[in-house]
Image (cartoon, rainbow, N blue to C red):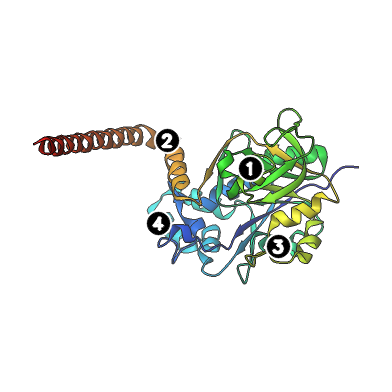
């Protein structure tokens, strides 16, 4: 019996973005640009490139800019037509025609699990994708498409995972692989597909069942909605998607897939800067001049570092000389 196709995707975007204050005080963190596109546009483009037909973005207060970004901009289009700028007209029109996007508001911050639950009426009884906006993934085949290919083979929930350093396991949901030999090795299919026995949300290093961290791409079967509806908030007052997936794993198979690609955590300042540099260097019109600028900056700061070290050495030498006297 063929599996139901995955046609819909949920993009949670209701968080406060406190790690980027004050920039996010009056604008959604999802609208912060990576070069010249807001980060959420990269996520939407990945979904579309993977074959998704309908997207629902779960928003919160002060997120109207997201809706405006993907909507028609009639006045702007008129101005561009007056200027005869066909290239920008095409860019703006393509953005608003990219895919059907719907919106639902998460009225209070109650965690990722609750945000997904808010989209249950949109999804219905179909399997669906979830893409988290903090994870930008650069890959030859879109990460979500990789998961969809796995789903089409196995028909079960599929989680994107990558191995992280052991000290970092406390930052992620971590899978407990079936048929594992120890805390860091698991039986894989074709080196990438892992059967999941259980999941642990942000475990202590000593309690982590593996180093396989769940990254922000999921294909989930609709049975999770009944579980989410019955899942009580945790100690933080939030409904965790990981807790619901743990329960789901007890009634149906769940797989994890070691995706191919480079992931940038754009919810973190360093990851955001890394992504900006990477995507800028991939732009033909920017690569040469921006690359030269980066080289100059590195050389400048290396020189400053050498100068500071030289001054410190002189100071230490003078101090030691005085001490000898």
| Spatial CA span between label 4 and label 2 | 33 Å
Give the residue number, with chain letter if any, for mark 4: 82
Q: How far, Cα to Cα, is label 3 from label 1?
A: 22 Å
Q: In this view, does 107 lie above or below 76?
A: below
Query: Of the residues under marks 3 and 4, which one precedes in the sequence?
Result: 4
Q: Residues within 10 Å of mark 2 (few under 14, many from 20)?
A: some
- Please indicate whether residue 237 sits to the left or right of residue 274 in the image: right
**Mark 3, mark 4: which one is toward the viewer?**
3
Instruction: Look at discs 3 and 1 and give the one toward the viewer.
Output: 3
Give the structural element (helix, strand or loop) at label 3: loop
* Mark 1 crowd level (few <14, some 14–19, many ≥20, 10 Å Cα): some
Residue placed under numbered mark 1 in the picture: 49
CA separation in Å, label 2 and label 3: 37 Å
SS at mark 4 in the image: helix
Residue with the mark numbered 3: 119
Residue 4 in the image, given as x and y percentages of width and height: 83, 48
- Name which residue lies at 59% across and 39% down: 166
Farthest residue toward the top? 190
Residue for badge 2: 281
Residue 48 visible? no
Residue furthest to the bottom: 107
Location of residue 285 by image quarter: top left
Q: Tell me which numbered mark, 2 or 3, is placed earlier along the sequence.
A: 3
Decide if residue 160 is in sight here: yes
Q: How crowded is mark 3: few (under 14 residues within 10 Å), some or many (20 or more)?
A: many
Residue 185 percent coordinates (x, y) = 70, 32
Among numbered discs 3 and 1, the one appearing first in the sequence: 1
């Amino acid at each position: 019996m063929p599996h139901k196709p995955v046609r819909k995707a949920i993009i949670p975007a209701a968080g406060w973005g406190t790690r980027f204050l004050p920039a996010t005080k009056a604008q959604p963190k999802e609208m912060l640009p990576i070069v010249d596109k807001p980060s959420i546009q990269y996520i939407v483009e990945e979904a579309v490139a993977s074959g998704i037909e309908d997207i629902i973005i779960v928003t919160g207060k002060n997120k109207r800019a997201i809706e405006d970004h993907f909507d028609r901009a009639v006045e702007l289009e008129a101005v561009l037509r007056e200027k005869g700028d066909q290239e920008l007209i095409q860019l703006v029109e393509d953005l608003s025609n990219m895919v059907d996007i719907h919106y639902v508001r998460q009225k209070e911050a109650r965690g990722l699990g609750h945000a997904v639950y808010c989209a249950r009426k949109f999804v219905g009884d179909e399997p669906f994708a979830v893409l988290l906006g903090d994870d930008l993934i650069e890959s030859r085949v879109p990460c979500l498409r990789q998961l969809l290919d796995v789903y089409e083979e196995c028909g079960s929930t599929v989680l994107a995972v990558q191995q992280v350093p052991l000290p970092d396991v406390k930052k992620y949901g971590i899978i407990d692989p079936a048929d594992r030999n120890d805390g860091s090795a698991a039986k894989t299919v074709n080196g990438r597909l892992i059967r999941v026995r259980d999941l642990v949300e942000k475990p202590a290093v000593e309690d982590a069942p593996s180093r396989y961290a769940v990254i922000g791409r999921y294909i989930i079967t609709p049975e999770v909605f009944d579980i989410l509806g019955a899942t009580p908030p945790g100690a933080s007052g939030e409904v965790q998607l990981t807790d619901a997936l743990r329960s789901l794993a007890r009634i149906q198979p769940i797989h994890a897939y070691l995706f191919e690609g480079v992931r940038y955590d754009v919810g973190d300042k360093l990851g955001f800067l890394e992504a900006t540099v990477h995507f800028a260097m991939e732009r033909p019109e920017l690569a040469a001049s921006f690359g030269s600028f980066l080289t100059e900056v590195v050389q400048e700061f290396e020189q400053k570092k050498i100068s500071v070290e030289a001054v410190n050495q002189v100071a230490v030498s003078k101090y030691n000389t005085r001490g000898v006297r």
